[in-house]
Amino acid sequence: MPSADLVLTGARVRTLDAERPHATAVAVRDGLIAAVGDEDDVRHWRGPGTEVVDLAGAHLVPGLVDCHSHPVMGLEMTTGVDLSAVRDLDGLRSALAAADRIDGWVVGFGLDHNVFGGRSVDRALIEDVLEGAPAFLRLYDAHSALATGAALKAAGITGPRAFAQRAHLATDPDGRLTGHLVEHAAMDLVTAVMPRPSRAARRARLTELLSAMAATGLTGAHVMDIGDPDLVGSVAEDTVLPLRLRFAPWCMPGAAKEDLEELVALQGLGGRHWEIGGVKFFMDGTVEGGTAWLEHPDCHGQGTEAFWPDPAAYSEAVRFLDRAGVRTATHTIGDAAVRHVLDTVAALGEGARLTHRVEHIESVPDDIVGRFARTGVIASMQPPHTAYTRADRSDEWSVRLGEARARRAWRLRDLRDAGAVVALGSDWPVAHHDVRAVLATARAPRGAASERAGLTGAQALEGCTTHAAVAAGESAVAGRIRRGFRADLTALGADPVEAPADEVAEAPVRLTVTGGHIVHRGA
């Protein structure tokens, strides 16, 4: 009998496999799980080349997966000064005055809408502390930014523009550009002329980031963008990627048949520990930016239009991809957006080939909740986003939606109880990538969702394991500790099911294994 590459012993194993829920030892060979059981079951797998790790009572679970992340695109989105700790306008002005320049620019990210205290996002509030330097500040939602007049001038922007999607350059009542750039097409006008990190710098940061992600227990991520296949491929050729990355390139409004065919042709492209699989759509934007598609307007009278000017064109694109065997994931935050995606999938009928996903789902009425299970649509949600809201609902998200809609925030438990598959993620860099925080906040939602029941410990763990596998169409090879499955494993110092949520958030990560490779060793 061939020997194993790796044998883990002395563990408290939660396999999430109904045939054998618990074990104490696991053997790994050629990137797959070769045996699951007790010490006697793996003893004969030991050989001269086998690495044996005694986990000394650590809790071993299937490898944790972030079901919504941007680890490659996020490298540029997190360039410059981190503004996530800024809480008010005075703090923002101080941070910008002290910020380092990047080729003469001030670049920042993670800026909370609540910093503006209900005021319009306007460059006039900050320009005097920048001494004429162009500045580009991403707001935390990643769907909007604030650019100064010097930055607008560098991009050749002198007035409003028309876009194929629901993007716009905000103006004040007098028609002056405020510098508030809403949605990707508007932001792209400025990012096209901004300083960009070198390829070497991006490569180094990617390696560092993936290692940091693995140190929290992550073994994989569903990447909701195309990333940079050449960059990822070159890194994967030189080393073992610490995370298994599954990329879903974007399909934007106006996509023609030729564009859809190109997306189909990309499927399956990849290498060791990375692959393109699926397509990402946007049905709307964000509540704070006024671009979430709502069934009733927000407090500013906004939010009544879809990201796709012709929602029927979106539905036809999903139908085309479904027939081609391509899974879709659609960014849908508002209730009208969620309803349209569910209607689209339901209209595929019994001929639908695949399971499709809805990303975010921040506020939905009762009649929508039960439809997820009936249509088989996966609810992909990001519990850490609740931290951007407030329990008293004085935050920008809650105020825009109004009391009734804010009270139905992030209905994780309701969706699970209704029978839906609920896959969990962080949406890094919108929220921190630490998967332990994802597990913890799924059980104890924060802010406007703090009155809602969270998931159980078991449900939260499933959201990053078995349900994550279903969301990727990989339930036959991943998400459980079972013979023949991928050897993606996470060992924690606390039981993610039974330990209190706050302990899970701080649990030591003893070992992270991806594809049979130990990619992180804890103390």
Image (cartoon, rainbow, N blue to C red):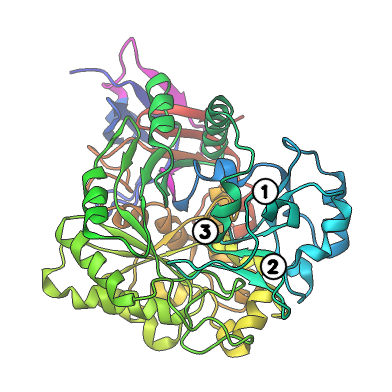
Disc 1 target residue: 154
In the displayed structure, 396 sits above or below 82; it is below
* Residue 499 placement, left or right of 88: left
- Categorize mark 1 by other alpha carbons within 10 Å: few (<14), some (14-19), many (20+): some
Percent position (x, y) of residue 191? 59, 48
Residues marked 1 and 3 touching at CB (< 8 Å): no
The CA span between labels 1 and 3 is 18 Å
Q: Identity of the amino acid at label 3?
A: His
- Categorize mark 2 by other alpha carbons within 10 Å: few (<14), some (14-19), many (20+): many
Q: Identity of the amino acid at label 2?
A: Leu
| Residue 30 appears in view | yes
Tag 1 secondary structure: helix
Task: Classify residue 32 by image quadrant.
Answer: top left
Determine which of the numbered discs, if any, sits on residue 177 in the image.
2
Task: Classify residue 147 by image quadrant.
Answer: bottom right
Disc 3 target residue: 184
* Residue 447 placement, left or right of 29: right
In the displayed structure, 505 sits above or below 30; it is below
